[in-house]
Amino acid sequence: MDSKDYQSWYTMDVDPSDYYAQIAAESPKDPLAYARTRDTDLTVPPSVRDKMFNVSAEIKNLFNEYGTPLPPLMGGCTVVNLCCGTGRDLYLAAQLVGENGKVIGVEPDAAKLEVAQKYLDKEIKQFGYSNCNVEFINSVPENLSAIADESIDIVISNCTFNLSPNKDKYIEEVKRVLKQDGEFYFTDVFTDRRIPVEKAKDVKLRALRLGGAMYINDFRRLVQSKGFHDPRYPMTFQTPVTASEKALFPDTAFATMTVRLIKSSWSEDVCESYGETVTYKGNLPDYPDCFLFDFNIKFPTGKTCAVCGNVSALAAHTRYAAAFDYTGNRNQHIGDTHGDKIIKVAPAYEGVYDEDDQPIQASCC
C-alpha cells in the first residue's frame, strides 16, 4: 500500500451529511469520554482564559474538546470554525476578533448547532457588542459552498479533521475559502504509522477520534499536494489513550498536535535561503519572551535571526508581520537552508568506472 492508496482508502464513499449523523450517533454521550485535547496552560492561551467566563455553561459542558486552537492576532479577522459543535471555541473567537471581525460556525449536527444558536443573543450582549459578529451554517467541512472563494482570514477546528470522510475535499475547501496568506490553524490527532484500512473506515473508531487519524507523513503529502507547502506543528502532546483503545491499535503512537498551514505563494516545499532575517518584537500578549514557530523552533524577543523563505513567508507577508521586523528580499537565492547534501559533496570526476570495478553500494538507510 502506497501513500495514494492509503489516502483513497481513508476516503469513504458516503454522503458527508449522513456520515456525520452516524458519527454523532456513535459518539459517547459524555464529552469527556472522547476528548483528545486538554485544558492546560500550554494549549489554552492565557489571554483567552478570562473569556471563558463569558461563554454559557451549557455550551462548555456539552463541548467535546478542551484544547483551544486560537492563533494570535485575530483582531478584525473573518474566521471560520469547522465543526464548531456547541460553540465554545466559536464564542471565544468572536471575542478575539472583536465587533469589527466575524466568525462563521460550520456544524453538521443540528442538535449541537441548536445549543450554540440558543445562546447567540445572550453571548453578543455579554460581549458588549452592538452588532452580532457570529453566523452559523448547518453544513459539513467538505462542502463550504455557502462561503465565497478567498473570503476568510483564518480557519480553525478542534479535533475534527480526523473525523472527515474525505480529507482531500476537506483541505481543498479550506484552501478555497482562505484568502492569500490566510491561515488554517487547528488541533488534531495524528499517528506514527498507517492505521489498517478496516479500522480506518470503522465509524465507531472514527467517533473515538482515533480511527480517522492520519499518519503524519501522509498528512504532510496531502497538504503539500494541495498547495500548503510548509506544514508546521507549534505544539505536540502525547494523546491520552485508554488501555482498551491501546488494544485496538497495538504498537501505534498517537500525538495531539496543533497545526499551522499558511496559504502562501511565498512558501516552498523545503527551506530555501535568501539571506533574510527576522526579529520578533515580543508584542503578542501570550508570547512576551519568544514566538513559537514550530514545536522545536522559537524566535526570542529582540534577537535577529537568519531564516529560511518559509519563515519569512509568515513573518513578512501575513498578518504576523505586525509582530516582526524583517530585512531582506528574494533577489538572491543561496540554496538549501540546511546545506546541500548532493552537489557540494559530489566527488571529483576521475573517469568512467566499469560496474565490476566500482560496485554500487545499496542500502535503505
Image: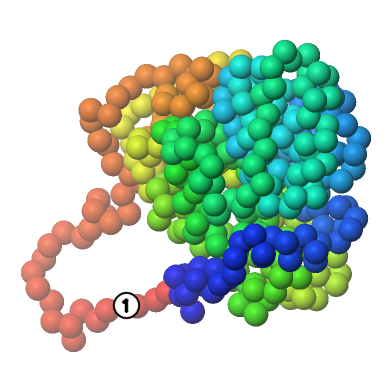
Which one is in front, 192 or 54?
A: 54
Q: Quadrant of the C terminus?
A: bottom left
Q: Is residue 242 above or below residue 170?
A: below
Q: How many marks?
A: 1
Residue 14 location in percent, x, y? Answer: 59, 69
At a point 79% along the width and 47% down the height, the residue shown is: 112
At a point 86% along the width and 69% down the height, the residue shown is: 243
Which one is in front, 16 or 71?
A: 16
Indicate the secondary structure of the residue bearing disc 1: loop
Amino acid under disc 1: Gln
What is the quadrant of residue 353 in the picture?
A: bottom left
Count residues near mark 1 (Cα–Cα under 10 Å), then give few for <14, some for 14-19, many for 20+: few
What is the quadrant of residue 167 in the picture?
A: bottom right
At a point 90% along the width and 42% down the height, the residue shown is: 61
Residue 362 location in percent, x, y? Answer: 34, 78
Q: Please, which residue is most extreme toward the left here?
A: 351
What is the quadrant of residue 293 in the picture?
A: top right
Q: Is residue 112 above or below residue 273?
A: below
Name the colouring of the figure. Answer: rainbow
* Residue beneath disc 1: 361
Is residue 49 found left or right of 212 in the rendered image? right
Which one is in front, 25 or 323?
A: 25
- Residue 93 appears in view: yes
